[in-house]
């Protein structure tokens, strides 16, 4: 339901260029992929316990979207769709700062191996991971892709004091 609510708003924004009096700067574009920010609820619990994860889902929006336009599109979607998760959607800017990211190919359960490669890389460059929270950008639809072919960008923040 939450994902459906996000996509409903994202497609309302996307299709706004076809409406009468489109917003300034509105144009056709491909809706950005779903993203999730993942964190731990209890840091003393093993990473393998999936019930210990907290997450926030999001979809990047085009540059022409303002808070006022977002509010208008959300209101329009709420009149057409009866998804209770629409009440939870918010518009905000995120500044991720300096990050390490890598394309992970395979099932989500295999991500720890990719994170290990990322940790080795940042250590070799003099960087350190700042916290356990990370972002995933889903390039594949798990309903339509074999697990071994899934593509996910993994990203986490690092301190900016590396050798480069």
Image (cartoon, rainbow, N blue to C red):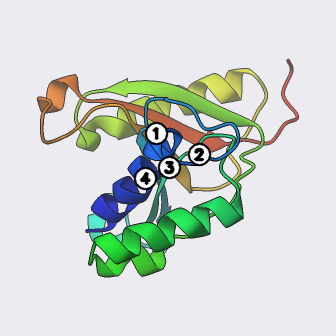
Looking at the image, residue 128 sits to the left or right of residue 152; the answer is right
Q: Position of residue 38 (x, y in %)?
A: 47, 58
First in residue order: circle 3 vs circle 1: 3
**Front of the two marks 1 and 4:** 1
Task: Give 87 or 17, whichever is nearer the viewer.
Answer: 17
How far from the left and from the top, in percent, is residue 157? 68, 44
Quadrant for residue 66, please give it: bottom right
Residue at label 4? 12
Residue 96 to residue 124: above or below: below
Instruction: Read off the residue under disc 3.
Output: 13
Please say if the residues under marks 4 and 2 sit with CB atoms less than 8 Å apart.
Answer: no
Q: CA distance from mark 4 to mark 2?
A: 12 Å
Residue linked to disc 2: 22
User: Residue 152: image x %, image y %?
Assistant: 37, 33
**Residue reaching furthest top?**
164
Q: Residue at x 62, y 23 (%)?
A: 121
Residue 35 appears anywhere in the view: no
Sequence-earlier tag: 1 or 4: 4
The front one of 158 and 3 is: 3
């Amino acid at each position: 339901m939450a994902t459906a609510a996000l996509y409903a708003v994202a497609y309302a924004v996307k299709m706004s260029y076809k409406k009468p009096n489109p917003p300034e700067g509105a144009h056709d574009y491909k809706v950005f992929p779903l993203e999730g920010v993942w964190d731990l609820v209890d840091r003393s619990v093993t990473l393998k316990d999936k019930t210990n994860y907290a997450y926030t889902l999001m979809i990047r929006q085009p540059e022409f979207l303002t808070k006022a336009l977002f509010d208008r599109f959300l209101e329009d979607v709420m009149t057409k769709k009866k998804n209770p998760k629409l009440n939870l959607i918010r518009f905000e800017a995120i500044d991720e700062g300096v990050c390490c990211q890598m394309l992970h190919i395979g099932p989500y359960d295999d991500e720890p191996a990719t994170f290990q490669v990322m940790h080795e890389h940042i250590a070799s460059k003099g960087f350190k991971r700042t916290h356990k929270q990370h972002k995933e950008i889903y390039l594949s639809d798990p309903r339509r892709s074999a697990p071994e072919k899934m593509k996910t960008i993994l990203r986490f923040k690092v301190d900016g004091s590396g050798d480069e």
